[in-house]
């Protein structure tokens, strides 16, 4: 059964039922995972194929999914979703923003499809990296996780929008763990692409291994940082995690509606005027680079902060309607098993004009933070970001490595405290969890923060 | 049950046979079929009403000592064939694993833990969940609305899960369970414009729907502690009381990681090679209890068909052992502890915890709050802790200063840092006598430590 046939039948039936709005997503995700732990290879693969159906009726949204993609199963899911919406007996959710009928098909270009590369070649490529890592005397344990997927998404709605989008995604995470004179440390590195099997062209195994081992070496020779407030220079990777974790979530329309620290702050100055932050679906080779979102909405750039002023939030159809905001196409679902949520795509801080040397100049003592171990924010705007690789800054120069620290603070205060923004830029790849997983990119230039809380050990 | 083309058990057996036909020297199949309902609340409004119908088959196949895994959605003949075919193809593309020793044999007997299935829960109608969600919204608005408290997010779901496993060594088991899980997140906006931290309360049961209003009451109590601010605290060492949620989060990313047999074999566990030694305060006992009656993670068999069991990991501070699945157990030279955990049919089994129970102590709630203490209710960033060393640096949020049992206000942005292994060994002052379940599968008491470093946010 072709997805298009199933979807046309769905739209006809939903229109017949007289619902205010309904949409369906047929998704087929063929994936391969290869894990290499201490040199032991475990390949996994699968086909995730299913359909999600959503019905809006009298203020309620009913959602149903099924792993059987047949006309009968989809109509059954539609009737279940409709029954759910009716079960609520009238709800308070305003209707979605709607669009004109449309037909679109988009395939993200790839240099070489993952489907054209034999599994054995992929295993050998990973073992090459593993071999380079195992050769280091400092490494006691190592782990590489490779993930690739070909995602086909088909969307249809009662607006008679029929949209399909296909893209490939490749992601690798490698970690090494080591010890030296009783000091234990680890380092992690990720890389990704949506351009097919091009990972090792973007970063060769030699470069991957060198970076990982350098980071581990720094960890094993690092000292414990001082706790307290210091000037900090953040490198692009750390800026990416900060704009995503600490700031981006506060600008997701559902969390804004729920009272995040950005609620009611539109048009206000929420950051230093040097700061501009966007969530951009058109970044070259980003994990959040998408033509349409999971509500069939054409994606658009969300300008969250422009020269320090909060301009826009990221929306889906429902929260755009609820908050009277522009639809930005930020609705994403992990798979057909979930209704879409407002999610980030490629969240980046735009570059400024400063050079790294200028930023370091004038710092008597501070920290230079290169990479992170992830972070977490709360609706009140308080954030914590764990740090992977970091160094002291002593009299304007990058000094000795430090280990096991975290930065924390209030996001908006921290953005106000940014006094220099670099002219460089880096883009990074990761997975964000908000009850559902989403592949995202984030990034930015180097930035300097006048004062940031370092949670080290006293 | 849903009318799938094949039953879970039939599908499992078919998948094993198919993998053998494809050339596997041995094979295992795991099937899960789930049906349920869930309602979510976002920003004070009932948002999604979800019907869940999920089914799939997962296959592990070995060709000699090469092993592969695959899964497919649906339980029709074509998905079963596809999963089996891919698993065998993956095994062939793999490399020999010198430690591979085959799939488990059937266990001599299987437990009857009880309290994991309730027919009435399997029959709950979605209207019931909608009513509970509406009651929650009404309750919070009426009881706490004037003080600026609102429901930012909430969710309530019920599900019935059937799982089946079969392998070419004769393992063939079926089990069915019911679940109800909910959470409430409250946030307050105070008259002075401050936003409180968002506070989550989780509730779960295998036999009944948790009370959403009770969860809201508990969350509101914590949110309202943020009405006052305890300012002027200097960075330094404090007596800290970790509430069950904060302690559970820290344990999960440190101690539990180190009690995982895979980490012990791979040399990354802090506790590797220390069985029989005292590693914690003698008031601390930690058990993984896969047969806990009505436990959130209780089943009769684990993700590879081994009987679930109760495993003492730390007894009165002394390390007794680790959790294992059959593969990592063999590498350590011990038996599986029935801890092969799967994320449903979409993942292969690996050693994971079932119900983690940290035994209660003897301190009353009043004793825990004696003197001047900072109570950390929840932490941000526990996942950035270092499992190998125990070093952590998190934000306690909410963290509240208490003096002689009286709350003095929230400590904004409290950066709490230390080394959890050292602290559990030598800084424990009291273990609370109340064990709570801050989130599914974690049964944890309150814990009071002395000399923990806390740095309030720089002003």
Image (cartoon, rainbow, N blue to C red):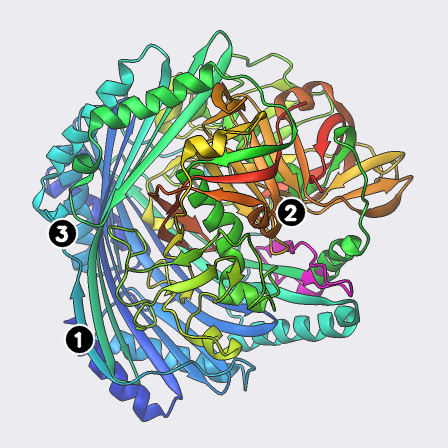
Q: Residue A4 carries which label?
A: 1
Judged from the image, the secondary structure of the residue bearing numbered disc 2 is: loop
The answer to whether residue A375 is seen in the rendering is yes
Q: Tell me which numbered mark, 3 or 1, is placed earlier along the sequence.
A: 1
Q: Residue A139 lies in magenta, yes or no?
A: no
| Residues shaded magenta | B187-214
Q: Quadrant of the rendered structure where residue A22 is?
A: bottom left
- Mark 2 neighbour density, 10 Å: few (under 14) some (14–19) many (20 or more): many
The chain carrying label 1 is A
Does mark 3 fall on the same chain as mark 2?
no
Number of the front mark, 1 or 2 = 1
- Whole-percent x and y of residue A64? 38, 72
- Whole-percent x and y of residue A223? 54, 17
Instruction: Please name the residue that numbered disc 2 is placed on.
Output: B438
The chain carrying label 2 is B
Q: Which residue lies furthest to the right in this view?
A: B404
Judged from the image, the secondary structure of the residue bearing numbered disc 3 is: loop
């Amino acid at each position: 059964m072709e997805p298009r046939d199933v979807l046309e039948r769905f739209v006809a039936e939903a229109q017949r039922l007289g619902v205010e709005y309904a949409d369906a997503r047929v998704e087929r995700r063929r994936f391969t995972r290869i894990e290499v732990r201490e040199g032991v290879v475990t390949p996994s693969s699968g086909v995730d194929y299913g359909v999600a159906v959503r019905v809006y009726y009298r203020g309620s949204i009913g959602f149903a999914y099924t792993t059987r993609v047949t006309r009968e199963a989809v109509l059954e899911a539609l009737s279940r979703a409709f029954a759910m919406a009716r079960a609520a007996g009238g709800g308070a959710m305003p209707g979605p923003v709607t669009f004109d009928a449309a037909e679109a098909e988009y395939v993200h270009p790839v240099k070489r499809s993952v489907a054209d590369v034999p599994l054995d070649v992929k295993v050998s490529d990973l073992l090459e990296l593993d071999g380079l890592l195992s050769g280091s005397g400092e490494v006691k344990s190592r782990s590489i996780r490779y993930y690739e997927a070909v995602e086909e998404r088909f969307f249809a709605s009662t607006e008679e929008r029929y949209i399909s989008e296909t893209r490939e995604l490749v992601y690798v995470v490698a970690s090494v763990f080591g010890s030296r004179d009783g000091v234990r440390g680890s380092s992690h590195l990720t890389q990704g692409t949506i351009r097919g099997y091009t990972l090792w062209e973007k970063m060769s195994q030699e470069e991957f291994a060198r970076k990982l081992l350098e980071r581990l070496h720094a960890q094993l020779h690092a000292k414990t940082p001082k706790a307290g407030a210091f000037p900090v220079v953040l490198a692009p990777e750390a800026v990416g995690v900060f704009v995503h974790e600490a700031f981006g979530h506060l600008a997701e329309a559902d969390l804004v509606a729920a009272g995040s620290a950005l609620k009611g702050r539109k048009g206000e100055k929420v950051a230093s005027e040097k700061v501009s932050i966007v969530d951009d679906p058109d970044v070259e080779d980003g994990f959040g680079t998408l033509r349409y979102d999971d509500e069939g909405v054409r994606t658009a750039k969300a300008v969250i902060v422009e020269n320090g002023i909060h301009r826009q939030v990221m929306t889906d159809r429902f929260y755009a309607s609820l908050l009277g905001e522009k639809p930005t196409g930020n609705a994403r679902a992990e798979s057909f098993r979930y209704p879409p949520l407002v999610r980030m795509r490629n969240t980046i801080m735009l570059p400024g004009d400063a050079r790294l040397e200028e930023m370091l100049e004038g710092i008597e003592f501070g920290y230079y933070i290169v990479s992170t171990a992830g972070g977490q924010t709360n609706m009140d705007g308080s954030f914590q970001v764990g740090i992977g690789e970091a160094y002291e800054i002593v009299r304007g120069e990058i000094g000795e490595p430090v280990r096991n620290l975290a930065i924390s603070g209030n996001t908006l205060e921290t953005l106000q405290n940014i006094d220099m923004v670099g002219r460089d830029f880096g883009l990074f790849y990761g997975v964000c969890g908000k009850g559902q997983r989403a592949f995202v990119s984030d990034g930015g230039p180097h930035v300097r923060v006048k004062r940031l809380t370092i949670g080290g050990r006293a | 049950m849903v009318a799938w083309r094949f039953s879970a058990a039939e599908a499992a057996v078919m998948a094993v046979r198919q993998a053998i036909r494809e050339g596997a020297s041995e094979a295992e199949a795991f099937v899960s079929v789930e049906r349920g309902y869930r309602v979510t609340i976002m920003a004070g409004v009932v948002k999604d009403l979800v019907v869940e119908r999920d089914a799939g088959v997962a296959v592990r196949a070995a060709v000699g000592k090469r092993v592969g895994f695959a899964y497919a959605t649906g339980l029709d003949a074509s998905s079963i064939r596809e999963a089996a075919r891919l698993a065998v193809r993956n095994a062939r593309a793999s490399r020999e694993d010198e430690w591979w020793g085959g799939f488990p044999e059937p266990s001599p007997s299987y437990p009857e833990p009880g309290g994991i299935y309730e027919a009435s829960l399997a029959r709950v109608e979605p209207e019931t969940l909608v009513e509970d969600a509406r009651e929650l919204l009404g309750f919070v608005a009426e009881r706490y609305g004037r003080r600026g408290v609102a429901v930012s997010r909430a969710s309530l779901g019920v599900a019935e899960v059937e799982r089946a496993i079969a392998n070419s060594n004769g393992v063939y088991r079926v089990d069915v369970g019911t679940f109800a899980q909910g959470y409430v997140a409250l946030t307050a906006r105070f008259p002075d414009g401050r936003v409180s931290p968002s506070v989550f309360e989780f509730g779960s049961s295998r036999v009944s729907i948790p009370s959403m209003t009770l969860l809201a009451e508990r969350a509101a109590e914590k949110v309202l502690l943020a009405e006052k601010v305890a300012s002027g605290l200097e960075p330094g060492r404090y007596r800290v009381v970790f509430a069950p949620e904060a302690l559970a989060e820290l344990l999960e990313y440190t101690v539990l990681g180190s009690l995982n047999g895979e980490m012990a074999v791979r040399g990354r566990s802090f506790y590797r090679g220390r069985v029989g030694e005292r590693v914690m305060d003698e008031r601390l006992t930690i058990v993984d209890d896969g047969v806990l009656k009505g436990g959130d993670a209780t089943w009769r068999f684990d993700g590879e068909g081994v009987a679930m069991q109760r495993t003492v990991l730390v007894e009165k501070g002394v390390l007794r052992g680790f959790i294992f699945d059959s593969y990592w157990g063999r590498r350590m030279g011990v038996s599986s502890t029935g801890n092969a955990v799967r994320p449903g049919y979409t993942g292969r089994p690996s050693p994971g915890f079932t119900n983690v129970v940290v035994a209660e102590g003897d301190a009353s709630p009043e004793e825990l709050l004696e003197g001047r203490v900072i109570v950390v209710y929840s932490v941000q960033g526990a996942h950035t802790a270092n499992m190998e060393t125990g070093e952590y640096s998190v934000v306690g949020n909410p963290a509240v200063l208490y003096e002689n049992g009286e709350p003095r206000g929230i400590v904004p942005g409290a950066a709490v840092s230390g080394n959890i292994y050292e602290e559990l060994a030598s800084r424990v002052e009291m273990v609370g006598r109340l064990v709570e379940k801050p989130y599914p599968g974690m049964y944890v008491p309150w814990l009071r430590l002395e000399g923990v470093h806390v740095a309030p946010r720089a002003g």
